[in-house]
Amino acid sequence: MSAMENADIEDRPANYANGWASLLVWLVFAAVSIWYGYLTLAAARPPFQLVVGIALVALAAKGFVIIPPNMAAVLTFFGKYTGTIRDNGFFWCNPLSLRRVVSLRINNFTTEIIKVNDKNGNPIEIGSVISWRIADTAKATFSVTDCASFVQMACESAIREVASSRVYDHSLDENEQLKTLRGDLEGVAKDLEMKVGDHVVVAGIEIITAKITHLAYAPEIAMAMLRKQQATAVVAARKQIVEGAVGMVKQALEEISREEIVDLTADQKAALVTNLLTVLVSESETQPVLTLNKS
């Protein structure tokens, strides 16, 4: 088999028989061998055939295999992959085949909290938990040395790719529609699941779920970024307050003009706008003085 053929090995069912029926045949064969051996010894003939019979009985017994639920047995015959037994139960297969039991159960792997840079180059800490299982027993057995170690390396690589493709959080000059790490954890988890799946498909591994368990700025910039977030929040709040105040002042001037409550000169309008904005925007109580001349 060439190197290219070895790389293209895929999971396929092995040839095997029902274990209980095979056990019955084996017992009959063993009983016949014992009886024939007794007759051979009684007749004082050479025990060659008896030795051969016992060897065949012992060899046939090696073919029995028990497969628990969510387990599989990968069979190789003189170095060649012959198939996989995925059914659970009692079976008999080629006694000369080497069997390697592979778990099909779901495994959970919690990554260490690693330090990476986001899209803006800010150092962040991120950790995740990955649920995976073996989907292709042939690839998992023959393509990699250790599936668990392979998944670990793939997870760390995928986390770095996902984290470096997004910013941790919005800044004042960034588009609010931009998906960030902190603001789109579900999307980050889906990206991580897809990235890890792409890395481990060569080993016949299926990624069930991927979840972010830890996400924070690195300690060396955490306080600075916290102050930045606070400043951003203050600026955003002030902006909203000013926009609301301007709208209220505009509405007040329009109402005064429409109801003809008082005629205001340009200077009086400017003073009124100043006083209203002072009242609406100021954080402390104010007592403006309005001087209005009726016409």
Image (cartoon, grey):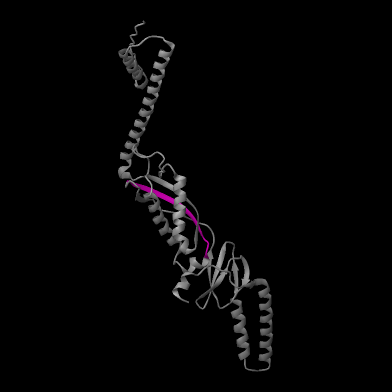
Identify the residue at horizontal 56%, vertical 64% (top origin): 71
Question: Is residue 264 found left or right of 5 in the rendered image?
Answer: left
In the displayed image of the protein, which residue is found farthest to the top? 295
Residue 118 rendering spot, x and y as whole percentages: 35, 47
Residue 116 rendering spot, x and y as whole percentages: 35, 50
Magenta-highlighted residues? 122-136
Nearer to me, 53 or 198: 198
Identify the residue at horizontal 64%, vertical 73% (top origin): 17
Q: Is residue 131 magenta?
A: yes
> Is 216 rendered above or below residue 136?
above
Identify the residue at horizontal 41%, vertical 47% (top origin): 214
Residue 162 rendering spot, x and y as whole percentages: 40, 51
Quadrant of the image containing the C terminus: top left
> Is 31 rendered above or below residue 153?
below
The reply to whether residue 103 is visible in this rendering is yes
Q: Where, by quadrant of the figure, is residue 222 drawn?
A: top left
Nearer to me, 77 or 119: 119
Q: Taken as a whole, is the magenta stretch helix, strand or loop?
A: strand
Residue 290 rendering spot, x and y as whole percentages: 34, 11
